[in-house]
């Protein structure tokens, strides 16, 4: 539905804005959990650990039974929180459990979820775009229970609705706009788990079933199900709300839209490569990106290598491309091109903060500098092509610098996404003023500033080709994302909904 896309300038834009990220949510219902809920909370913890790539800033787990909630949460990676800082929550006869890996996109840094209010607990992945309106409409303070986040405000709105917990959830989510995948827990005679996904389907959410048949699971990505001893059943549909309790899984609301706005950045970077997102294998998508990038290999390139870890699948796709195969080095002649792993990441550096420098709230440049090392034997004297998923603020310059120091003769970059030029208000929350493509608009000047000999970004039509598996006519490039049920607003500036009601994230610790 093209008319839902509204072009407008971002409502806030300053040099202090930071690049933020998603969260991960997990839910579980079981009628066969241990007496104190420890088996259920352990299962949810396993899911959170599997999804820690989505949020490294905090983790929380909540249990619910007929009468009460029990919750534990703290700052840090999920496994560190629940081994070094906190015990898993325990609650007699608990049958519902929620969990969240936190990376804040609005409010303050450490508003870790789940939140609880008036018999309803919730956790949220995404970002609401009408929070300013909701606060005004329902006379809500900017800080509730010491928390500033859009999720806490949404829970307050839900509890302004009349009726039972179920009725309040169903009526409340009708008032929400933006990107949201949410899980809720309720107490009462039949404690229930609810899962809801916004009508445009920005964020993924999947339903699973415990392998022993004792209940069901919900998670941001299907890769969480294996560690939870469950298996994938289906995706929660855009606009769908399901209720899970002793009666099984019931769809209790459905808001169908003619067009979707699935976040293309989920496929490019956010999700794990072994996930299936929006019905698409993330690994296969990234591999197709690489095959397309292989059409743009610079002349004279001798070595292709990924910037690990997010560039690996695309780089392998380059190595499988027709352009690469045509130039591959023969066994008899010392010429051509090779695929090699020339850049190493030390998994033990910044282990307490998490390995993904993209979503670290502070000191990203320093993290990138310490994270990467280069194999001099592979790159010395060579013309090197590095493959990465995206360039955001420009921390790739640290990788290029290390390649030069190791003796690389030339360094070229193939980037498996278009240029990021606009803020995202649907849960990733790029700050426009921080994007290097805006600071240095000319791509050749930008390449020079990053220390590169050349720089190539995928076009809009190429990224959609990777998503759908077919070439796309350039004549429809202007509306190519919405025609294919994706949101590409971070590239185009064309938003699928009104964004004037968002609230910016505050971070007083950024350097």
Image: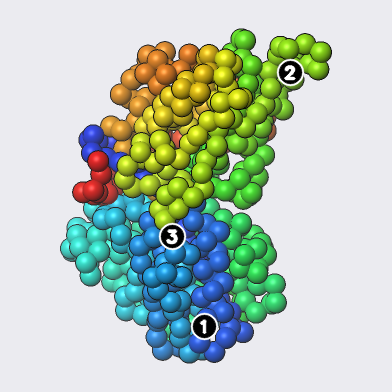
Chain-order first, disc 3 or disc 2: 3
Q: Secondary structure at mark 3?
A: loop
Question: Sequence order check: which comes first, mark 1 or mark 2?
Answer: 1
**How many other residues sit within 10 Å of disc 2, few (<14), some (14-19) or many (≥20)?**
some
* Residue hosting label 2: 328
Residue drawn at x 40%, y 81% is 70
Left or right of 280? Residue 481 is: left
- Label 1 sits on a secondary structure element that is loop
Confirm or deny contact between disc 3 and disc 1 (CB under 8 A): no
Q: Residue at x 20, y 63 (%)?
A: 143
Question: In the figure, 383 relative to 18: above or below?
Answer: above
In the depicted structure, whether residue 328 falls above or below residue 245 = above
Front residue of 376/231: it is 376
> Spatial distance from mark 3 to mark 1, Cα to Cα?
22 Å
Residue at image point 63% right, 37% down: 313
- What is the spatial separation of the Cα atoms under label 1 and label 2, in whole angstroms? 57 Å
Viewer-side label of 3, 1: 3
The x, y position of residue 470, in whole percent, is 67, 29
- Viewer-proximal residue among 425 and 344: 344
Q: Which residue is mark 1?
A: 37
Give the CA distance from mark 3 to mark 2.
42 Å
Percent x, y of residue 53: 49, 51
Location of mark 3 (residue): 77
């Amino acid at each position: 539905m093209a008319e839902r896309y509204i072009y407008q300038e971002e409502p806030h834009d300053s040099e202090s804005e930071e690049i933020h990220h998603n969260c991960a949510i997990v839910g579980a219902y079981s009628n066969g959990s241990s007496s104190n809920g420890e088996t259920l909370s352990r299962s949810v913890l396993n899911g959170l650990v599997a999804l820690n790539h989505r949020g490294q800033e905090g983790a929380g787990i909540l249990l619910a039974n007929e009468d009460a909630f029990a919750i534990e949460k703290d700052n840090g990676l999920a496994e560190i929180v629940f081994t070094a800082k906190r015990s898993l929550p325990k609650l007699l006869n608990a049958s519902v459990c929620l969990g969240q890996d936190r990376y804040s996109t609005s409010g303050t840094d450490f508003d870790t979820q789940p939140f609880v209010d008036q018999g309803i607990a919730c956790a949220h992945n995404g970002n609401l775009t009408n929070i300013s309106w909701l606060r005004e409409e329902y006379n809500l303070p900017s800080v509730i229970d010491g928390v500033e986040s859009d999720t806490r405000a949404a829970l307050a709105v839900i509890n302004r609705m009349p009726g039972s917990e179920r009725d309040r959830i169903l009526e409340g989510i009708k008032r929400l706009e933006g990107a949201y995948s949410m899980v809720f827990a309720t107490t009462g005679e039949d404690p229930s788990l609810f899962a809801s996904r916004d009508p445009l389907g920005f964020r993924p959410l999947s339903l699973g079933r415990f392998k022993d048949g004792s209940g069901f699971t919900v998670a941001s990505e299907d890769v969480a199900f294996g560690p939870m001893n469950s298996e994938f059943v289906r995706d929660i549909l855009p606009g769908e709300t399901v209720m899970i309790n002793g009666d099984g899984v019931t769809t209790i609301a459905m808001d169908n839209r003619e067009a979707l706005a699935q976040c293309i950045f989920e496929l490019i970077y956010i999700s794990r490569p072994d996930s299936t997102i929006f019905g698409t294998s993330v690994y296969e998508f990234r591999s197709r990106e690489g095959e397309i990038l292989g059409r743009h290999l610079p002349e004279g390139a001798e070595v292709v290598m990924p910037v690990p870890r997010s560039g690996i699948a695309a780089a392998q796709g380059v190595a499988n491309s027709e352009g690469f195969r045509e130039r591959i080095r023969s066994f008899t002649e010392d010429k051509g091109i090779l695929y090699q792993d020339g850049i190493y990441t030390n998994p033990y550096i910044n282990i307490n903060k998490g390995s993904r420098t993209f979503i670290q709230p502070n000191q990203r440049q320093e993290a990138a500098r310490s994270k990467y090392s280069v194999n001099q034997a592979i790159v010395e004297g060579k013309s090197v092509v590095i493959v990465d998923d995206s360039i955001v603020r420009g921390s790739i310059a640290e990788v290029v610098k290390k390649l030069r120091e190791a003796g690389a003769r030339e360094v070229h970059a193939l980037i498996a996404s278009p240029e990021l030029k606009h803020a995202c208000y649907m849960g990733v929350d790029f700050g426009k003023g921080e994007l290097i493509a805006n600071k240095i608009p000319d791509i050749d000047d930008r390449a020079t500033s990053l220390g590169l000999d050349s720089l190539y970004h995928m076009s809009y039509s190429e990224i959609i080709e990777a998503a759908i598996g077919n070439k796309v006519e350039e004549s429809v490039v202007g509306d190519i994302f919405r025609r294919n049920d994706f949101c590409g607003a971070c590239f185009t500036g064309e938003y699928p909904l009104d964004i004037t009601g968002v609230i910016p994230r505050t971070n007083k610790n950024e350097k």
